[in-house]
Amino acid sequence: MANSPQAKKRARQNERRFAINKARRSRIRTHLRFVEEAIASGDQAAATEALKKAQPELMRGVTKGVMHKNTASRKMSRLAARVKALGA
């Protein structure tokens, strides 16, 4: 249990930030799931549209410190390759 005023404040801040980051992660995962579902259905147009909506969410996650930039880039790259393969 936090005893000092500073430790109590940090505990409050951590709770708040955890909730915010949890919501951000959830939003990112939701957009990634939309892309996955579009790829699974085989609809390249829908997959491309979903990918365009997912990219800013991923990059926003990087900016906000939810995920590492290389992780976001890797996810985008792999999804883009799979969407591109639908058209081939």
Image (cartoon, helix red, strand yellow):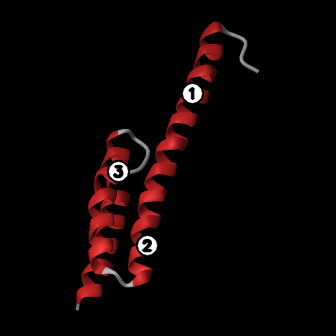
Residue at x-position 30% and y-position 57% = 53
Question: In the picture shown, does residue 88 fall above or below 32?
Answer: below
Q: Is residue 6 left or right of residue 61?
A: right
Q: Which mark is residue 57?
A: 3
Question: Which residue is most to the right?
Answer: 1
Residue 35 can be seen, yes or no: yes
SS class, disc 3: helix
Is 81 left or right of 36, judged from the image as shown? left
User: Looking at the picture, which amino acid does disc 1 mark?
Assistant: Arg
- The CA span between labels 3 and 1 is 21 Å
Residue at horizontal 50 percent and vertical 40 percent from the top: 21
Instruction: Sort mark 1 into few (<14), some (14-19) or many (20+) by Cα contacts within 10 Å.
Output: few
Asked if one can make out residue 80 in the rendered structure from this viewpoint, the answer is: no
Look at the image and tell me in which quarter the C terminus lies. Answer: bottom left
Residue 47 x %, y %: 32, 73
Residue mark closest to the camera, 3 vs 1: 3
Q: For mark 3, does the 10 Å Cα neighbourhood hold few (<14), some (14 to 19), or many (20 or more) residues?
A: many
Q: Quadrant of residue 13?
A: top right
Residue at which label 1 appears: 16
| Residue pointed to by mark 2 | 36
Residue in view at x 55 percent, y 43 percent: 22
The disc labelled 2 sits on which kind of residue?
Glu
In which quadrant will I find the N terminus?
top right
